Every structure is written in structure tokens, then in C-alpha cells.
Image: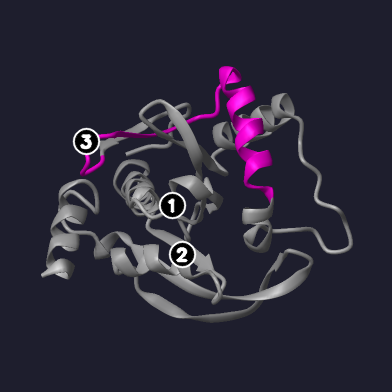
Amino acid sequence: MSWRWPVSVRHQLPDGRALVLRPLERADRAAWESLRRRNEAWLRPWESTAPGERTPNLPFPRLRRVLDRGARDGLVLPFVIDVDGEIVGQIQLFDVLWGARQAGWAGYWLDRQATGRGVATWALAALVDHALLEVGLHRVEVAIRPQNSASLAVVTRLRIPEEGRQRGLMHVDGGWADHRLFAVVAEDLRPGGYAPGGLVALLHRRAG
């Protein structure tokens, strides 16, 4: 098990579509910029900001360089979520710690038009499996604002354990916001991880 970059993670969604977590590519510029513009208002309440500053939108070439450098340094896994060749969002493992911790935080967002079809659930399952089973980290944490019902539904479907509430954890949309903390450790995973078989079985049990 080791950290590698660039790397892609591939799965098939239950409806047959191809889900790929992959690096942002130079050819993605037009689609990426359009996606971010279209979802600016939709994402604003949930995205981190810097206190007292207007959070800048990095030009696409610089964004790619920053993400790629962080990934090569073992600090972040910055994937776009690609469904059948179309970018529909982003998921990343960030603030990765090594040594005694071997942990990272997971964050994700989707195009508003792509929500409600299980894509975020499968993407998070795939990221957790990759981080814990392939990279060899021990813990993945997910912090979610209590008002973010869509993201809370994702961790609920995966049965990721909740560990409590962290006050003023992150500056979001102009103010310090409390977050609910969820975390999964390597010992929580069944053989093969969450995706594909483990998640399919889990969702079938919940439906029954």
C-alpha cells in the first residue's frame, strides 16, 4: 500500500454508468469553469472561506498546479467526479497527516443537477476505500454542517459513525460554523471495503 499520484479510481454505478475519480486535466478547463459558475450560489453556503477576505477563485491553470503539487507532496488527493465522461463535481482527501496519525479529511460537492442519484454516496465510498485500503491511511474524517441535509444523507447511507459536534470548526460563507464530525477507521471496513459490493449489500439491507 502506498501513495501514488496521478491515480484514478473506477467503479460502476448500479444503473450501469461509469464513475471515475480522477485528477483535473488541462482539457477539463471549459467544463470545469462552466460547472463552477453554474453552481456558485448552490455551493456558497457550504464552502470554506477565509475570515476577513474575499476567497479568490484561482485561475484554472494555477488551480491545477496547486492541486497537483499538493498531491505529489502527499498532502491531498484532489479528484474530480466523472460520470460517463462528464465532470459532475469534486471529492478530495485533504489535510493528510502521516506519522502517528495517518489520517485525512474528506470533502465533496456535486453539480446541483447531479444530486439525488447516489453519485456522492458512491464517490465517498470509493474515496474511503482508496484511502484506507490502497493508500494505507488509518482514518478518514468527514465534517458536515448540521444544516447540510444532503451531505448528512450521504454519511447516513454509508453508516459512517458520528463522533460529536465541533464548535466553530471552519469558516464557511462568511462566519465560523459548527460541524458534525463523522469518521471511519480501517478496522470499520468489511473485506473489500464500501464499494462496490459492500455498499450494494449495505443499501439492500437498508431497503429491506
| Residue linked to disc 2 | 150
Q: Quadrant of residue 198?
A: bottom left
Mark 1 and mark 2 lie on one chain; the one further toward the N terminus is 1
Nearer to the camera, 45 or 107: 45
Q: Is residue 135 above or below residue 200?
A: above
Q: What segment is highlighted magenta in the picture?
A: 13-40
Looking at marks 3 and 1 on the same chain, the residue that comes earlier in the sequence is marked by 3
Magenta-colored stretch includes residue 31: yes
Q: Quadrant of residue 159?
A: bottom left
Q: What is the x, y in percent for residue 166?
A: 58, 79
Quarter holding the N terminus is top left
Residue at screen point 76% across, 30% down = 59
In the image, residue 199 lies at what x, y percent? 21, 55
Image vertical order of residue 63 relative to residue 184, above or below: above
Which residue appears at 66% of the width and 32% of the height? 33
Is residue 68 found inside the magenta-colored segment of the image?
A: no
Please, what is the three-letter code of the amino acid marked with disc 3?
Gly
Q: Secondary structure at mark 1?
A: loop
Question: Circle 1 sits on which residue?
Answer: 115
